[in-house]
């Protein structure tokens, strides 16, 4: 599992380069992506994938906002690349694979799973987004 | 800088008083023409200054919107710049691909501008730079001219080199391939597919193709590259190879920003961005599916 967390970190940093994140924020992006995947892979042992994705998204979002307050820059910078390991890329693949191989039941199942994961990510982002900026400032001791 | 700002403010207040009650301290007949001239010249100066402030605020909004910021950030930055330089009536309506601004009241000149901002690549470094700039502006470190210069230099900030981007896409694909369960050989194939995919994005799909065709083509390209690698013996799990290397196509920015816009209540822009994300998701799936069914033809009907 440690190697997959490492892979999440490397992947997140590589993608933040694609989005033009300034170089000094790469370590933060990597940490946040790695932390998100770590939480996901621990949570998925206990809960359904959607629940794990929700929890991991909440962690990614909390860390992104904390880093944004800490570094005084938009949270988007950390969020966009940090969320990537959780995006249901595998769901897209399996859905289209099952559709073209005529396994419609499985296609429906995986497509539904992918949509559920996407909704979980949406909810995670929206929930944490509602926490006022003041809370993060106070917690980190920044004015 | 602060002093000159104070002076300007005083001058502005003076001009306002003259504007509001030009008749109250009406001078003698001989002086009147001269006084009116002064008055007019001052309002003209005011107008051009207001115009400069609004243009600068619009430029800031343009840079933010073009490079992947949320709608609320664009509006907030516009308002902040207007307020900081004393234009009270400035107001902006921002959509995901355009900005409409107007200003004007009894005291301030009328000004309106619409700017179409086509969706282009994401450069979060520019968003961060404008954010930093507006923070420094609030501390009073910039005159309006300096702010405009700083924004111009942000607009021309260099992009990452293309070779770097291609390499990052390859490494990212390999990393995500491992994340979903691929082994070393799968990662090598995903690396190759990721490199080729970004070359395709930069030189074919970006400049020449529409979003729909571009993403279908991208999904198909990745699947073909991985499929041929698999058939040639490189890589053991075709599915993990493909999943890893379609990641650079996944519309993470549109998806995330769409959610945030909807959460902010910017439903129009949020819906447009979500639609964009969903469309791209579908197109990738279609491309992958088409390529898989073509590939099964090569293997004589044996599913991969």
Image (cartoon, helix red, strand yellow):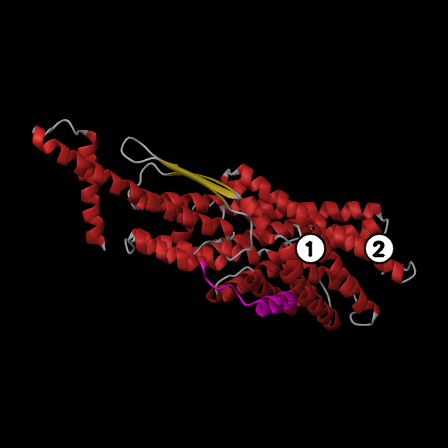
- Front label number (2 vs 1): 2
> Which residues fall within the magenta stretch?
B156-173
The chain holding disc 1 is A
The quarter holding residue B40 reads top left
- The residue positioned 11% from the left and 28% from the top of the image is B26
Q: Is residue B184 magenta?
A: no
Where B61 sits versus B246, above or below?
Answer: above
The chain holding disc 2 is B
Comparing B121 with A85, the one in front is B121
State the quadrant of the C terminus of chain B. bottom right
Q: Is residue B165 magenta?
A: yes
Mark 1: which secondary structure?
helix
- The residue positioned 14% from the left and 33% from the top of the image is B33
**Horizontal and vertical percent for residue B145?**
31, 53
Comparing B28 with A70, the one in front is B28
Where B90 sits versus B178, above or below?
Answer: above
Are the residues tagged 2 and 1 within 8 Å (C-beta)? no
**Horizontal and vertical percent for residue A105?**
83, 45
Q: Distance from label 2 to label 1 (Cα)?
A: 19 Å
Disc number at residue B293? 2
State the quadrant of the N terminus of chain B. bottom left
Mark 2: which secondary structure?
helix
Q: Residues within 10 Å of mark 1 (few under 14, many from 20)?
A: many
Main secondary-structure element of the magenta-colored stretch: helix
Residue B20 visible somewhere in the drawing: yes
Disc number at residue A89? 1
- The residue positioned 79% from the left and 69% from the top of the image is B229
Comparing B265 with B51, the one in front is B51
- The residue positioned 9% from the left and 33% from the top of the image is B31
Q: How many marks?
A: 2
Where B104 sits versus A86, above or below?
Answer: above
The quarter holding residue B226 reads bottom right
């Amino acid at each position: 599992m440690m190697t997959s967390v490492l892979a999440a970190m490397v992947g997140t940093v590589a993608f933040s380069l694609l989005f033009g994140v300034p170089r000094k924020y790469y370590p933060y992006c990597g940490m946040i992506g790695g932390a998100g995947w770590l939480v996901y892979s621990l949570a998925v042992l206990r809960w359904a994938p959607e629940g794990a994705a929700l929890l991991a998204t909440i962690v990614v979002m909390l860390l992104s906002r904390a880093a944004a307050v800490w570094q005084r820059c938009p949270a988007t910078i950390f969020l966009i690349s940090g969320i990537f390991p959780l995006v249901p890329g595998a769901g897209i693949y399996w859905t289209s694979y099952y559709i073209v191989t005529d396994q419609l039941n499985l296609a429906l199942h995986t497509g539904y799973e992918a949509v559920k994961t996407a909704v979980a990510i949406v909810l995670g982002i929206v929930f944490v987004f509602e926490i006022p900026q003041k809370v993060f400032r106070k917690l980190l001791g920044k004015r | 800088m602060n002093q000159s700002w104070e002076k300007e403010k005083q001058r502005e207040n003076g001009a306002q008083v003259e504007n509001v009650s030009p008749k109250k301290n009406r001078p003698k007949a001989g002086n009147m023409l001269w006084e009116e001239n002064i008055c007019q010249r001052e309002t003209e100066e005011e107008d051009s200054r207001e115009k400069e402030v609004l243009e600068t605020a619009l430029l800031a909004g343009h840079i933010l919107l073009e490079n992947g910021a949320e709608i609320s950030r664009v509006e907030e930055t516009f308002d902040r710049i207007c307020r900081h330089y004393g234009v009270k009536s400035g107001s902006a309506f921002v959509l995901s691909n355009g900005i409409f601004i107007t200003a004007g009241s009894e005291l301030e000149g009328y000004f309106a501008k619409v700017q179409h901002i086509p969706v282009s690549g994401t450069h979060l470094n520019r968003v961060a730079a404008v954010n930093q700039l507006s923070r420094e502006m609030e501390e009073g470190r910039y005159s309006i001219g300096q702010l405009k210069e700083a924004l111009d230099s942000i607009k021309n900030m260099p992009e990452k080199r293309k070779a770097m981007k291609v390499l990052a896409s390859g490494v990212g694909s390999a990393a995500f391939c491992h994340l979903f369960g691929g082994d070393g050989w799968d990662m090598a194939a995903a690396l190759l597919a990721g490199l080729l995919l970004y070359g395709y994005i930069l030189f074919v799909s970006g400049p020449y193709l529409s979003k729909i065709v571009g993403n279908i083509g991208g999904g198909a390209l990745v699947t073909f590259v991985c499929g041929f690698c698999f058939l040639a013996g490189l890589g053991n799990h075709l599915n993990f190879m493909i999943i890893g290397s379609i990641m650079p196509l996944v519309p993470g920015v549109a998806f995330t920003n769409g959610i945030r816009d909807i959460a902010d209540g910017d439903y129009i822009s949020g819906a447009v961005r979500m639609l964009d994300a969903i469309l791209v998701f579908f197109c990738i799936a279609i491309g992958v599916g088409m390529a898989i069914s073509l590939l099964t033809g090569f293997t004589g009907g044996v599913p991969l």
